[in-house]
Image: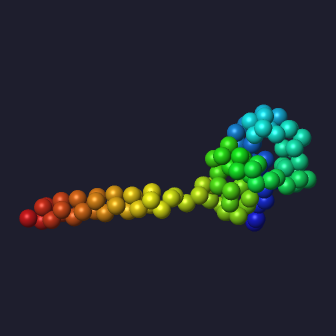
């Protein structure tokens, strides 16, 4: 089941317990324009999509219905740091296991 931008926008707003008026004010648009976005009468521009992603803390792919994953994949340097940490911990575990065997 594919979800689309209008449904996702409304869902994100409801999840925060916001009225259209309150969300529109935070997003720096009119309540009428937000209503048009949420009911599919108008499509947003790229600037608004970026602003909405930042505001709701989701990726553009999620907001546009292209991914079920709410946030983007981690940056490669972050992944590299995680791999390095896992290798370090694995080394410590191996060393302790070897010590326990002797």
Number of labels in the image equals: 0
Across and down, in percent, residue 31 comes to: 86, 38
**Direction from residue 5 to residue 76 in the image, left or right:** left
Of residues 9 and 42, the one drawn nearer to the viewer in this rendering: 42
Q: Quadrant of the N terminus?
A: bottom right
Q: In the rendered image, which quarter is residue 85 located in? A: bottom left
Across and down, in percent, residue 96 comes to: 18, 59
Q: Residue at x 39, y 58 (%)?
A: 81
* Colouring convention used in this rendered image of the protein: rainbow
Across and down, in percent, residue 21 comes to: 82, 34
Of residues 89 and 99, the one drawn nearer to the viewer in this rendering: 89
- Most extreme residue toward the front, as rendered? 47
Q: Residue at x 78, y 59 (%)?
A: 4
Across and down, in percent, residue 19 comes to: 80, 36
Q: In the rendered image, which quarter is residue 40 located in? A: bottom right
Q: In the rendered image, which quarter is residue 93 located in? A: bottom left
Q: Residue at x 89, y 48 (%)?
A: 36
Q: Quadrant of the C terminus?
A: bottom left
Q: Is residue 25 above or below residue 99?
A: above
| Residue 4 makes an appearance in the image | yes
Q: Is residue 34 above or below residue 63?
A: above
| Residue 56 makes an appearance in the image | no
- Most extreme residue toward the left, as rendered? 102
Q: Residue at x 71, y 55 (%)?
A: 63
């Amino acid at each position: 089941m594919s979800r689309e931008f209008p449904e996702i926008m409304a869902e994100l707003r409801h999840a925060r317990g916001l009225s259209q008026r309150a969300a529109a004010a935070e997003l720096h648009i009119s309540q009428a324009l937000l209503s048009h976005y949420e009911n599919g009468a108008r499509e947003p521009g790229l600037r608004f999509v970026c602003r909405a992603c930042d505001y709701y803390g989701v990726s553009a792919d999620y907001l546009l219905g292209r991914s079920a994953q709410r946030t983007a994949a981690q940056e490669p340097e972050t992944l590299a740091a995680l791999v390095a940490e896992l290798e370090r911990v694995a080394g410590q575990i191996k060393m302790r296991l070897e010590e326990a065997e002797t």
